């Protein structure tokens, strides 16, 4: 029986691919080519975000598409791979590593926190507060968000 791969092993084993934008996505993104990103490229981009700064999922996708010379980066795989980066970072932390990917600096387009990150929005909020951000309380079913997040975007 095969052992289950760690998040780090998954992160390192998936290769990038460029495909035609699927017809079902052309209404939103148009025709052309779409990058299916390599998780390590997402990890490296997140690592480049300095302490106290933030990056959105859309900005990650824009930067990767520009670097690859394509029209768009797949939104679904980007979201999945950001979560994979977060899990790998926590595996690294559990192994005693101090230089981990600062995934908590990734926020949604409206500055909201990600409840699917390790420890949920509460843990992300704590890390962001440690870097000087103020967190607005959750409203209804929506998660909390970074106050004035626009000022801190890379």
Image (cartoon, rainbow, N blue to C red):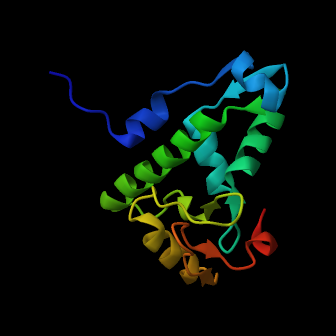
> Which residue is painted at 63% across and 39% down in the image?
41
Q: Is residue 44 left or right of residue 21?
A: left
| Quadrant in the picture for residue 22 | top right
| Quadrant in the picture for residue 152 | bottom right
Position of the C terminus by quadrant: bottom right
Q: Is residue 22 above or below residue 153?
A: above
Q: Answer whether residue 66 is visible to the viewer in this image.
A: yes
Q: Is residue 114 left or right of residue 95?
A: right
Q: Nearer the viewer, residue 71 or 11?
A: 71
> Which residue is painted at 72% across and 42% down in the image?
61
Q: Position of residue 23 (x, y in %)?
A: 73, 16
Q: Nearer the viewer, residue 102 or 96?
A: 102
Residue farthest front in this picture: 140
Q: Position of residue 38 (x, y in %)?
A: 60, 32
Position of the N terminus by quadrant: top left
Q: Is residue 137 left or right of residue 25?
A: left
Q: Is residue 34 above or below residue 135?
A: above
Q: Is residue 69 above or below residue 49?
A: above
Q: Position of residue 56 (x, y in %)?
A: 70, 56
| Quadrant in the picture for residue 36 | top right
Q: Position of residue 57 (x, y in %)?
A: 67, 50
Q: Answer whether residue 20 is visible to the viewer in this image.
A: no
């Amino acid at each position: 029986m095969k052992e289950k791969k760690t998040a780090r092993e998954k992160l390192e084993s998936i290769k990038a691919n460029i495909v035609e934008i699927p017809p079902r996505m052309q209404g939103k993104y148009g025709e052309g080519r779409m990058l299916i990103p390599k998780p390590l490229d997402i990890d490296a981009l997140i690592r480049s975000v300095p302490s106290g700064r933030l990056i959105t999922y859309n900005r990650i996708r824009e930067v990767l598409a520009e670097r690859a010379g394509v029209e768009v980066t797949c939104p679904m795989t980007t979201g999945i791979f950001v979560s994979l980066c977060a899990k790998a970072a926590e595996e690294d932390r559990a192994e005693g590593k101090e230089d981990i990917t600062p995934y908590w600096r990734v926020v949604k387009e409206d500055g909201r926190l990600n409840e699917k990150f390790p420890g949920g929005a509460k843990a992300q909020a704590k890390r962001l507060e440690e870097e000087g951000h103020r967190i607005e309380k959750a409203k209804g079913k929506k998660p909390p968000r970074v106050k004035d997040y626009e000022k801190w975007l890379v």
